[in-house]
Amino acid sequence: MVFMSHYILFDKQTNPFLHHIFYEGYVGVSFFFVLSGFILAYVYQQSFQETKVSKHFFYVARLARIYPLHILTMLIWVYMRKDHPLNEPYITNFISNVFLIQSFYPTEEIRFNAAAWSLSNEMFFYLLFPFLVTWFTTMRRKFLVVFTVASIIILLLCPILSGSKNEEWFLYSFPPVRLLDFVLGILFYNICQTIKVQNLVKSVSPTLLELLVIALFLAFYASAYFIPQVYRHSLWYWLPVGLFISVFYFQAGKISQFLSSNTFIWFGEISFGFYLFHEIVIWYTDRALFLLDIHVDKPVIFILGATFSIIVSGFSLKYIEKPANKWVKQRFNKPLASIL
């Protein structure tokens, strides 16, 4: 969905609804942030409660996962935009990208690999995660109250910020605001651990539940066409995304079993590389066709871009991400059994 939003095939004036279907990359980011909170709670929450894993080990594991590929794709963008003047905004944004703090301020200047803005958010989430799960397990009621109040404040700010210059940055990119998506993932994971939810999945057809959450997700996705954009940055997708992830977490239905095949697992493994490389691949695809004076329709470029992105991501996973991940963990960790 993020890829679709970066290469929209339909014009807004002539095909407004189809344009919306491609444009709505917001849901992909919301899905990623909520899923991130859910998965980290699944992997680490109990380990932190039982002090089986240290914050240092957790931070190194997270750094090893995202930083090597981020730096590589950022440097590729530096080369792609080598004609850009070395002015103060360029240098500031370069430094902020290196340290993954670029989402904390709005700018209209070059962002290098624009997709990396979400990594800035993720790094912020990772830094807070050990403290969030500790707070949640020790003071659950206060945690829920703060989350509810913060969500209401964001909801009330939406119509105030609608149409403003920094609307999209604040509601879509600003890490403290998007932290709510991440926390929601943690909450949905803990809901899934309750006996009532587990009994519900067992008592109702799991496949039917999976079909229902898919239908709910698609209904929200399509009907978002009628919802003001200011609410679609995140809030609109909380319920369908959270329920979707929660139901498929149990892997009890026929659809989740089908998606558990090695092929789909591989697609999941390359998804991070696909996300960081796809705009680079599209840029070079367009550039190559232009230099070769080859004229093709946009759907052809779309298919080529998606195909090349998959190929590049597969190569990246095997020869860049896994070796770099292993090296960072070995370099910065004491000998500990890896849980990732």
Image (cartoon, rainbow, N blue to C red):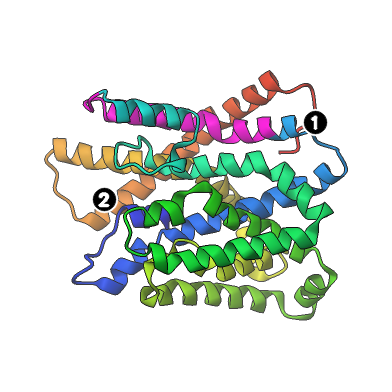
| Image location (x, y in percent) of residue 40 | 69, 48
Q: What residue is shown at x 85% (from left), y 70% (from top)?
A: 195
Tag 1: amino acid: Ala
Residue 167 location, quadrant? bottom left
User: Mark 1: which secondary structure?
Assistant: loop
User: Mark 2: which secondary structure?
Assistant: helix
Q: Is residue 49 magenta?
A: no
Residue designated by label 2 = 301
Q: What residue is shown at x 77% (from left), y 77% (from top)?
A: 200
Front residue of 89/201: it is 89
Q: Are marks 1 and 2 in contact (CB under 8 Å)?
A: no
| Image location (x, y in percent) of residue 118 | 48, 45
Mark-to-mark CA distance, 1 and 2: 44 Å
Q: Residues within 10 Å of mark 1 (few under 14, many from 20)?
A: few
Q: Which residues are magenta?
A: 59-85
Q: Main secondary structure of the magenta part?
A: helix
